[in-house]
Image: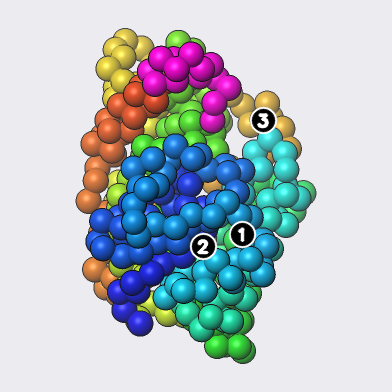
Amino acid sequence: MTNPATVGITGVAGFIGSHLAERLLAEGRSVVGIDDFSHGSPSNMDTFRDHPNFTFLELDCRDALRVRRTFGDCDALVHLAAEKIPRYGGALKTLQANVAGAESLYEAALALDIPVLVASTSDVYGNATPPFAEDANLTLGPPTTRRWAYATSKLYDEHVALAMAAEQGLKVKIMRFFGSYGPRNNPSWWGGPQAAFFEILLDGKLMEIHGDGRQIRTFTYVSDTVDGVVRTLDCDEAEGEILNIGGEEPTTIYRLAHECQAALGMTGPLRATMVPYEAIGGKYQDVRVRIPDTTKAARMLGFRATVGLAEGLAVTADWHRARRDALETAGLDVASVA
């Protein structure tokens, strides 16, 4: 079914979820969204909360029975709700929440006989050889390092989805996101290094660059990520497939720090300090290079990221400033509001 008219979204008050809902509503579609606000924010829905084609329910996506009832009139589902890399603890929560949430959505999609899009992650490639193609071998680190819990949970979700597709007829499309960023991202390490860098700089402190800063990442502005999701949603050929949704401009973390400082208009030497991995704890392991091969997405979806890093960071920097100004005007402590 192409161009589903009514789309159910988990994590709709989150970063990508809120931008996706905004885009779909602007296209004249209807959106049914759920979120438990464990990481999302009600303010992320301000631009569309009262839209006549938007329905919201505060709900944990793991509540399978209520999820099925809530999405009963939907033509397709997009599962975005998730826990992320347990940098400072919480590996068990990440594993359990991601697995239970995905299985809840799969069961709902099966019962309703509608397609489900699953947001996976570039983290599943681990230390594979870049650029990462969807059918490449995956190289994850050991289970004694908790940072791999997130990748493992998402990879398990992919396996379950494809097994249910083969054995039970689940209509599933899997998207692996690469470093999505932009306005409404969580203003902490949860939202990625650029979010943490902006907030630290605005606090007048030094950015923390982990390791040697030469790690290479591919960042994707949120409008490009959402475009990839919508194109996947509307593409029948994508059923049963895995697709990389990522940008075209790999950069080192060290360069990212420079770009964030420049986006805020801060001149002079780099305002940063280097933090060894040993100081992070949890036997932390990093990925040296993360670059997507987007050939398949270009061929199948006509997808290509169009927003450059400097352009995207400039808009994101303005949002961080505006957010802080609004909080301060309201008399709220910036540090206490995620």
Q: CA separation, marks 3 and 2?
A: 30 Å
> Do the residues bearing badges 2 and 1 touch, measured as CB atoms within 8 Å?
yes
State the extent of the magenta-drawn residues as a range.
Answer: 325-338
Q: Which secondary structure lies at badge 3?
A: loop
Residue at the image position 30 percent from the left and 49 percent from the top? 223
Q: Which residue has dot 2 on it? A: 79
Q: Is residue 31 left or right of residue 157?
A: left
Q: Earlier in the sequence, mark 1 or mark 3?
A: 1
Q: Which residue has dot 1 on it? A: 61
Q: Which secondary structure lies at badge 2?
A: strand
Q: CA separation, marks 1 and 3?
A: 31 Å
Q: Which residue has dot 3 on it? A: 280
Query: Residue 34: image x %, image y %?
Result: 53, 56
As shown in the figure, which amino acid type bears the numbered disc 2? His
Can residue 273 be seen by looking at this rendering?
A: no
Q: Does residue 100 show up magenta in the picture?
A: no
Q: Earlier in the sequence, mark 3 or mark 2?
A: 2
